[in-house]
Amino acid sequence: MSTAFRFCPACATPLAMIAMQEDGGLTERLRCPSCGFTHWNNPTPVLAAIVELDGQILLARNAAWPTKMYGLITGFMEAGETPEEGIRREIGEETSLSVDALSLVAVHDFQRMNQVIITYHARAHGEVRLSPELVDYKLVPPAQVRCWRAGTGLALAQWLRQQGHEPVFLEDLVQKPAAGSADSAG
Ligand SMILES: [Zn+2]
């Protein structure tokens, strides 16, 4: 059950968990007992990009993240745009880079955040200028990129395998921290 909504957005009646017959059987959902509004709590589509610039992968650190965490460029898909348009927009907004070519890498569930992550590989050019949302970035050769076992990290691992690099996961490096600056998370 989501705790994000307490009142009906249509009529402001307090929502309640109410069981109703659906195609899949009797299902309890957060509903409005007055007007019948249902909070479906469907996963939100998130777009992600493995941005390649001059043969290196751009990993960026969000202002809200711990110092050592770097991840892919991500953002929410907006109404009225295709996933491809959305990820081009996000890359432009967050890095100022222009995208030359896009290819879909993978679609993963990210249940902890109730999201579906659609990850693209993006070949880009230009000069990196970060949005205020991002505080730092680094360019890492593909062979030195470290993955993480969730969300975008799984897509990154899949792309590295396609490129002939066996992915190394941060979770496996707990005993012996990675040398250099290739650790990533997000
Ligand atoms: Zn209502």
Image (cartoon, rainbow, N blue to C red):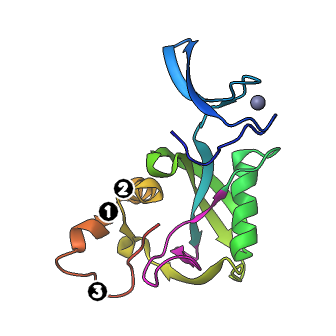
Read off the magenta span.
53-75
Residue depicted at 43% across the width and 70% down the height: 185
Q: Amino acid at mark 2?
A: Arg
Which one is earlier in the sequence, the residue at label 3 or at label 1?
1
Among the 4 quarters of the image, the one containing residue 97: bottom right
Q: Residue 160: image x %, image y %?
A: 40, 60
Q: Looking at the picture, tell me which residue is in the foreground, 175 or 123.
A: 175
Residue depicted at 47% across the width and 66% down the height: 186
Callout 1: SS: loop
Which one is earlier in the sequence, the residue at label 2 or at label 3?
2
Quadrant position of ligand 1: top right
Mark 1 and mark 2 in contact? Answer it, CB < 8 Å.
Answer: yes
> Whole-Å distance between the Cαs marked 2 and 3?
21 Å
Q: Badge 3: few (under 14), some or many (20 or more) residues near its Cα, within 10 Å? A: few
Residue indicated by mark 2: 161
Whether residue 161 appears in magenta in the rendering, the answer is no
Residue indicated by mark 1: 167
Q: Amino acid at mark 3?
A: Ala
Q: Residue 27: image x %, image y %?
A: 51, 20
> Whole-Å distance between the Cαs marked 1 and 2?
7 Å
Residue indicated by mark 3: 179
Q: Is residue 163 left or right of residue 97?
A: left
Callout 3: SS: loop
Whether residue 69 appears in magenta in the rendering, the answer is yes
Q: Badge 2: few (under 14), some or many (20 or more) residues near its Cα, within 10 Å? A: few
